[in-house]
Image (cartoon, grey):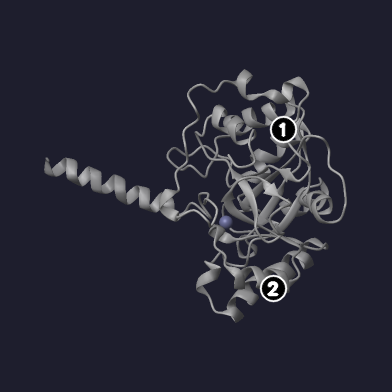
Amino acid sequence: MHKKTISVLFLIILFQGIVLGISGCGQEKVSRQTPQTQVVIPPPPPSMTLTESSNIKNGVSPQKPQEVPVLYYHSVLLEEGNEVRMPPEQFEAQMIYMRDKGYESVSLKQLYQAFYKGGTLPSKPFAITFDDGYVDNYTIAFPILEKYGFTATVFMVSSYINGEGFLSWSQLKELTAKGWEIEGHTLNHPYLTQMDKASVINELKSSKELLEKGLGQTVDFFAYPYGDFNADVAQAVKDTGYLMAFTTDRGWADLKLDEWHLKRVYCFANMGLNEFFRRLQNPNY
Ligand SMILES: [Zn+2]
């Protein structure tokens, strides 16, 4: 291989490494029962079309009240080659699909009430979550969601508040006033399973208190940074006073699992509408 080609390849690999390094809590995981090496995002089945995949249209909802798709995004902004930044027009196309199919967004509080406290949900519920607290959740995603009548939840890394590229307190307050939920995602976004117990508790507790003080309301829900958890971390989340926690394991939130291991539907740039539809047809996609 030509020396220049090798250098270019090296630069590409280096660049990809940097992109991955700034990509927040990143990609989905399959459930713990499956070996990590099998984590592959499958391409949509070639035979799938919108008409075939959409039995919702005929008035038959595939969703049981015990299973709700909780979508998760990070940033909504065009950046070539960074899959955690969803281009705005792709995000809007997905929301148009949800609106056209009669889905209604529910808050995590509603989900919690329905799952564990006997509350009810609309017939086609779904939830939207954003991890880390990118500023475009406010500048780009918020107006799009308002247009289609949806609200969302931000899992905010509390030390990122007011930081460059991230949400400010005034934006968080405005979102809260408009029905969004701002929930916990630690203080510094660490790998919690790699910390000692006292540090884990500090990450969980200080971030929860900061958000509660700043927003004047309780922070009840949590998402594990990088989807990284074990039994001790889940116990610490519970001990901190959270009511429910979300992983990055693929699947829908499911009442059959306990409230510390709820799965979510990963949404990433260039997933394509067919793959988005596919993930809304089957709780175990
Ligand atoms: Zn994260």
Give the quarter of the image for residue 260.
Answer: bottom right
What is the count of numbered marks? 2
Q: Position of residue 13 (x, y in %)?
A: 30, 48
Residue at 49% x, 53% y is 34
Q: Please report the residue visible at 27 percent of the width from the left and 47 percent of the height from the top.
A: 11
Badge 1 vs badge 2, beta-carbon distance below 8 Å: no
Towards the viewer: 124 or 182: 124
Callout 2: SS: helix
Kindly identify the residue that appears in the image at 63 percent across and 48 percent down: 264
Q: Residues within 10 Å of mark 2 (few under 14, many from 20)?
A: many
Residue 138 x, y percent position in the rendering: 68, 45
Q: Name the residue that disc number 1 marks.
A: 62
Say above or below: 161 vs 5.
below
Q: Nearer the viewer, mark 1 or mark 2?
A: 1
Which residue lies most toward the bottom here?
198
For marks 1 and 2 on the same chain, the one whose residue lies earlier in the sequence: 1
Q: Name the image quarter holding residue 60.
A: top right
Report which residue position mark 2 lands on: 205
Is 193 on the left-hand or right-hand side of 239?
left
Residue 115 location (% of width, % of height): 80, 52
Residue 140 has which mark? none
Q: Amino acid at mark 1?
A: Pro
The quadrant where ligand 1 appears is bottom right
- Relative to 218, is 228 on the left or the right? left
Q: Amino acid at mark 2?
A: Lys
CA separation in Å, label 1 and label 2:
38 Å
